[in-house]
Image (tube, rainbow, N blue to C red):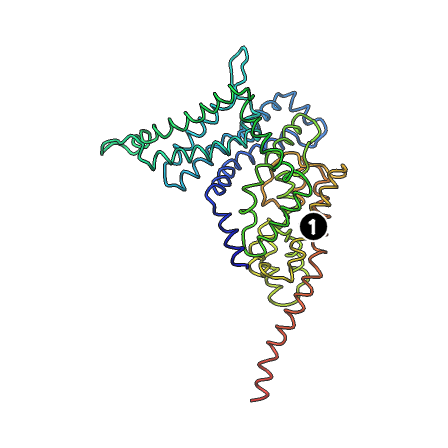
Amino acid sequence: MLEKIEAIAGAIGSQRHLRALRDGILLSMPLIIIGSFFLILGNLPINGYTDWLAKIELAPVFNKIVNGSFGLMAIIAVFGIARSLADHYEVDGVSAGVVALASFVIVTPDVVAKTGSGIPYAFVGSGGLFVAILIGLISAEVFRFFVQKNFTIKMPEGVPVAVEKSFAALIPGFMVILVWSLVYLLLGLAGVDNIHTLLTGILGKPLGALGSSLWGTLIIIALNSLFWFVGIHGANTINPVIQPIWLQNTDANRIAFQAGHALPHIVTNEFMMNFVWMGGGGTTIGLVICLWLFARSKNNKAMGSLSVAPGVFNINEPVLFGLPVVLNFKLLIPFVLTPMITAVITYFSMATGLVAKPAGIVVPWTMPPVISGYLATGGKISGAVIQLITLALSVGIYYPFVRSMDKAELRNETDEQQEPTAKDSIA
């Protein structure tokens, strides 16, 4: 049964379209983190700080940097998704990505003013992520179809490789742009405002209900833990499907935070990465602390010493596969329940206003707890406090299971030490 589950989940995780989606969104992560850094600089929790920035005219500069990095999420994603999928088919990924980017601009409506026209940030950021995913995947498929069917312009030998690739992409690129130009035309004739609002209505609401609600979050957490438990990378299996929703919620909070409005979402990318999965999937920071502080057996003490440093930085592969947690039924209950309980407590703390919501600031997932909570909530102490509380709770949940497992391991080590002595006595 486990082999079948692993085979199915492995196939899902390695499916080319999901991998392209994951890799394409990851391509935008450096810009998102850079934008978050300047978002923090523009909104430090110091009395009079924002007024001082406005006075010296740095506030609009910081906002421009944020919009020019964080706010380009969809543009980067459409290029990255198309390139990744085309690379999988072993065709020119860069050309496919460029053509997909052009297609995205074609279907996106312009804002027309007296000074000129342009594309609003609302569509090139998280608001355009659904369209970016769709265009990236379909454009790459159309592009590779014409390349693999040899509908390309052949250049004579001796022509530079860059020139040869450019001409080879002409016909496939023309067909991709023609497809999306027809889509834009037909939507206009049908009276549809634009493809962004259409897709957001069709796909955004059901996925948003799963990715933004507490019950949907608990389902995702349970699946993540169960995948990890059978040795499957939970994040790689689940995140390609649900992370676009979390990132959209992050960006919506970022926009509201910049404008000084109430933050609309609790469940964001940072809620999951920094508040729920502290120490990694299964909230294993509590496990590694228990091993480090309370284990008595040699094996478990050694594992605690080795895994606590990576665990503080939310890297838990050493304890997952070294202890192991994988297929260790003694740890299944806390491995599933701890992140779920952490999510419930943090969610209601934020919903009731006791703890500040994530402010749309993307904190690297390797940032240690307490620091990450302070930064993710826009410099609010309550973000660090709730992490301290749930961290202590995770230690308390894991403790009885670790003690029981450690006692059994200690007995095994004692028996192994006594066995040679018994053999010597018989001899």
What percent of the width, then of the height, locates residue 164? 29, 32
**Where 352 sits versus 56, above or below?**
below
Report the front residue among 207 and 192.
192
Q: Quadrant of the C terminus?
A: bottom right
Q: Looking at the picture, does residue 287 appear above or below residue 205?
A: below
Instruction: Please provide percent x and percent y for residue 172.
Output: 36, 30
Number of callouts in the render? 1
Q: Which residue is mark 1?
A: 391
Q: Is residue 244 left or right of residue 149?
A: right
Pick whichever, 100 or 23, lies toward us.
100
What is the x, y in percent for residue 117?
A: 51, 16
Observer-nearest of 178 and 300: 178
The quadrant of the image that shows the N terminus is bottom right
Q: Residues within 10 Å of mark 1 (few under 14, many from 20)?
A: many
**Residue drawn at (68%, 23%), measured in percent from left and top?**
51
Q: Tag 1, which secondary structure?
A: helix
Which residue occupies 61% across, 23% down? 58
Percent from the top left, x then y, of residue 205? 62, 33
Name which residue type carries label 1: Leu
Instruction: Name, please, the residue furthest toward the front.
Output: 190
Q: Residue furthest top?
A: 114
Residue depicted at x 46% and y 43%:
16
Residue located 67% across and 37% down the image: 358
In the figure, 13 relative to 132: above or below?
below
Looking at the image, the residue that sits furthest to the left is 157
